[in-house]
Amino acid sequence: SQTIHQWPATLVQPVGSPLSLECTVEGTSNPNLYWYRQAAGRGLQLLFYSVGIGQISSEVPQNLSASRPQDRQFILSSKKLLLSDSGFYLCACLNWRAYNEQFFGPGTRLTVL
Amino acid sequence: SQQGEEDPQALSIQEGENATMNCSYKTSINNLQWYRQNSGRGLVHLILIRSNEREKHSGRLRVTLDTSKKSSSLLITASRAADTASYFCATRGSNYKLTFGKGTLLTVNP
């Protein structure tokens, strides 16, 4: 079965600092990977998705970027954080064998001060 | 743009009662999925219903889909305190992206 790891679990960063959140997947190969952001009391906003190494699709213009250096690694980055980047960041993986349900990681709570 | 919209935004019931949450969407879908999120945690997939299905059951969960009305409902029967969580519907169209609603916060009081 698939397992998604995210770290760190929580992060407090000052405005203007860089960001790197990592997501790794076990138990599958060549997965579709997704980064979502969830603001407090809100639904999930899709930020990026990737269908393969080096292939990134951006859903919304923003201060963030994503990279996929390896098949089962997905990284979310920023050069300079904004206050509005605060939120709960979730990485997800598509399960091809179960009619496209998504498995989610445990999330990273980011607070920008 | 937000595709699924859950209703109500919040629901509070007593243990043992049934909980019904609704989801409406705007465009044609391939399937509709319901997820659960405990506070501060990732989402967990509950059930998926395809566009050619009308009803599906999984344990105490019952999902219906009405494509003519572009709506779905999630029924949790005989609720338990452990069912307290946020519930999201998500729709998948012709691509491999899911579009999530804002969720319903369900509180089951012991």
Image (spheres, coloured by chain):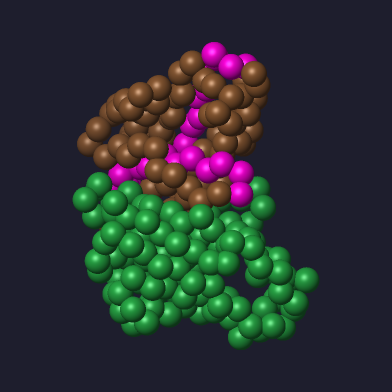
Q: Percent from the top left, x then y, of residue A51?
A: 30, 71
Please name the residue shown 49% across and 31% down the image.
B22
Image quadrant in which the C terminus of chain A is located: bottom right
Please name the residue shown 52% across and 20% down the image.
B79
**Residue B25 on the magenta span:** yes
Q: Quadrant of residue A69?
A: bottom left
> Is any part of residue B97 visible from this angle?
no
Q: Quadrant of residue A94?
A: bottom left
Residue range in magenta is B14-40
| Looking at the image, residue B54 lies above or below residue A6 | above
Chain ID, brown in image? B
Q: Colour of chain A?
A: green
Please name the residue shown 46% across and 57% down the image.
A105
In front of the other: B102 or B41 = B41
In front of the other: A20 or B99 = A20
Q: Percent from the top left, x then y, of residue A87?
A: 64, 61
Q: Percent from the top left, x then y, of residue A6?
A: 49, 64
In front of the other: B56 or B45 = B45
**Residue B17 on the magenta span:** yes
